[in-house]
Image (cartoon, rainbow, N blue to C red):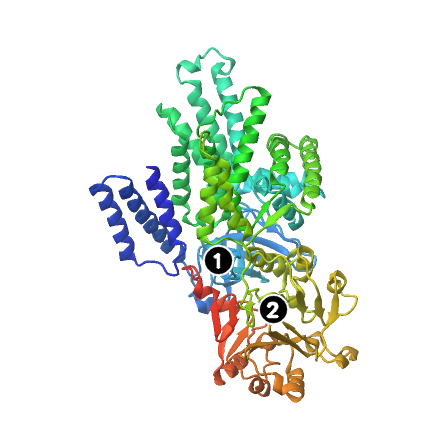
Amino acid sequence: MRSTILSFVAGAAFLQTRATLPATWQIAACLAAALALLLALRGTVRAAIAGTLAGFAWAAFLAHLAIAPQLAKLDEGRDIDIVGTVAKLPHDFGQGVRFQFEVEQVLTAQTTIPPMLALSWYRADGERLQLRPGERWRLRVRLQRPHGNANPHGSDYEAWLLGQGIRATGYVRAAPGNGRLADFVLTPGHLVERCRDALRARILAALEGKPYAGVIVALVVGDQRGIEQPDWDVFNRTGVSHLVAISGLHITMVAGMAAMAASSLWRRSFFTRAQLPLLLPAQKVAALAGAAAALLYVLLAGFGVPAQRTLYMLAVVAAALWMGRLASVSHVLCLALGLVVLLDPWAVLWPGFWLSFGAVGVILYAGVGRTQAAHGWRGSLQLASRTQYAVTLGLVPLTLLLFSQVSVVGPLANALAIPAVSFVVTPLALFGSLLPAPLNGPVLAAAHLVLDWLAWVLAWLARMPLAVFSAPAPPPWLFVLALLGTAWMLAPRGWPHRWTGAAAWLPLFLLQPSHPPPGSFSVTAFDVGQGMALLVETSGHRLLYDTGPQYAPGQDAGSRVLLPYLRARGIRRLDSVVVSHSDVDHAGGALTLLDALPVASVSSSLGAGHRIVQAARRHERCVAGQRWEWDGVVFEMLQPTSASYDDPVLKANARSCTLRISAQGRAVLLAGDIEAAQEAALVSASSDKLRADVLLAPHHGSGTSSSPAFLAAVRPAIGVFQVGYRNRYRHPKQEVFERYGVMAVQRLRTDDSGALRFDFGNTLGVEEHRVAHGRYWYDR
């Protein structure tokens, strides 16, 4: 059974790597083959092959059902009137409210939209928006098909939307007909979400203004959106972010408390003479009560993967007790694994899935051949220490694969945080959230006080110079080698020379980031939405041209796109950052980058008082005529002129730093947001230096740039448009886009291709992320 379940998961995971879905007949053939193998053959190999085929076919079948509801291309950007209910817990993000909306009726004629939407409702000045789960509303919305940024080593928003059943996103338009039609529509899902909303409101009211109120909310109802990014940074650096979620330990604790209470009361027949244990053994009642408490807590937690894993394991144990059958722990874990993937095949895409099941698997493996019984506090301490040691070692390869870093202070931080959060903060938070006001205030305040003390210690640990070890994300073969070494180190007692397993880790820790060969260079144009950010790499240096936009307060392209990519590549420093000008879509991520990693120098057209200039270790103005060479690659600044800084009339766009990079007769021209006047000046003064194989379209392809004379001087083979999907500026302008086409320029858009990588050497290599790493949910 275990081999069948594991191969079922492998088959489902394989489906999630495909660029296209199999046809219906192919799915049917896989299921028929799996059934035939199960009936005709015996043995582990048969079970594995059958499980793989069944997992692949099942995941493909669910994917077809999930992807079928589509918004027509013609309906994107139209005003559509709909009626529906607020399906999930809304989130107030300052500028408005984000929520999931379940459509009941489409009022606009000849329009079909998917049944579940992700909407934003931006508040007007002074407007107070308050939505609650289960409310029925009539709304006017504008929608678009699912779309997210597609970058190497980045999160996949489109996959997340698919897993949530959301097939369109959009925003609410101001309209006279918008209004609440019903305060509450009773369904099981709405009832659960309304309870979560009420608990969150009680906690936030009792802890108003407290810095870690969002963490308390996360521990009670699983809503982590109220936790600030700096707090997440501390939790990640200290390796305790798993405690902020409703973890398996928390659910097991709640289930255990409910089981003990039920067993105690049942044994005493609720202090009556009913003699209830004669009717039903107290052990079975305890199992039922524990499973019911776990189910309730998991529902309130939002049904995340770690919570599901624990719920299914507890359910299997409870079922085994009721049926009088003993269940081995490995069978229980495999059944939980199979149930999670059976109900949600997209769970395999998320780190929490692998970390959750990996941690339990490591604990089980490390416990083989060891006595696990704990006697007294010394025994409990030894058992906890052995468990923490096993989990810390066992998850190192997986953590490096998923996050390209490992918390060195994690064992110490977890030794402090696990008992504090699991046995003090969480019970107080749960108890306080259920108490009526004003009795809940002191209890929640006590939970927050302990969390505040813990956060101070964690922040101190996070600031340590060696708090985190970083390395490039390992290739598959190196990851497997490290796993084998880990298994050797954690093998049962008596296994020879267990410490030698550490040798398999050496290639993992010594792995260095890749570089272009000397005399060549590469350029990665990131998909950051409506903005610019490009990484230029030579054999020994790295330059970042622009840093992408700011998306919301505390969220920018630096934290969402650039840092995850640099971390996964093992890039720990930058030799230069060029911020072309002050527009937020070019400079939005700069402060995040400067705070997160060493940057030798910053070049920009910004004023001396700008925050980016103040934060830079070394800053110099971009000035035409600057020239330097790295590893046989020539960098030339063509714009702006020194005189332009003395002209107060010029816009920031006009001073965009324009950089040409060349080697071996090939070149790229990064033109920022220059407009027709600056293009004409460049053609007049530097026409001999403009020729380039790749041109970053000036000003994202706006109607004020890419003049015919300028394009004729550059004569690019490829034009790159860094634009956001359906951006409000309508970049690139149709006439400009067609101008490139008339000149036989290959046109690449990041909203269509995702991130773009160009390798400049003897030949020009081009890679489009959505093509090279295509997935069936990409809308191309």
Residue 42 position, x and y percent, is 23, 39
**Which element is circle 2 on?**
loop
Residue tagged 1:
158
Residue 628 position, x and y percent, is 67, 74
Of 695 and 393, which appears nearest the observer? 393
Mark 2 vs mark 1: in front: 2
**Which element is circle 1 on?**
helix
**Which part of the image, by quadrant, shows the C terminus?**
bottom left
Residue tagged 2:
532
Give the residue type at disc 2.
Met
Give the residue type at disc 1.
Glu
Of 767 and 223, which appears nearest the observer? 767
Q: Is residue 331 left or right of residue 100?
A: left
Q: Is residue 12 left or right of residue 159?
A: left
Q: Residue at x 69, y 45 (%)?
A: 464
Q: Count numbered badges in the picture.
A: 2
Give the farthest residue toward the top.
Answer: 273
Asked whether the viewer can see residue 165, the reply is no
Of 757 and 26, which appears nearest the observer? 757
Residue 331 vs 558, above or below: the answer is: above
Check if mark 2's residue and mark 1's residue have beta carbons within 8 Å.
no
Q: Is residue 309 left or right of residue 444?
A: left
Residue 719 vs 513, above or below: the answer is: below
Q: Residue at x 48, y 40 (%)?
A: 501
Q: Residue at x 49, y 58 (%)?
A: 82
Residue 233 position, x and y percent, is 64, 48
**Which part of the image, by quadrant, shows the N terminus?**
top left
Of 65 and 692, which appears nearest the observer? 692
Residue 115 position, x and y percent, is 44, 55
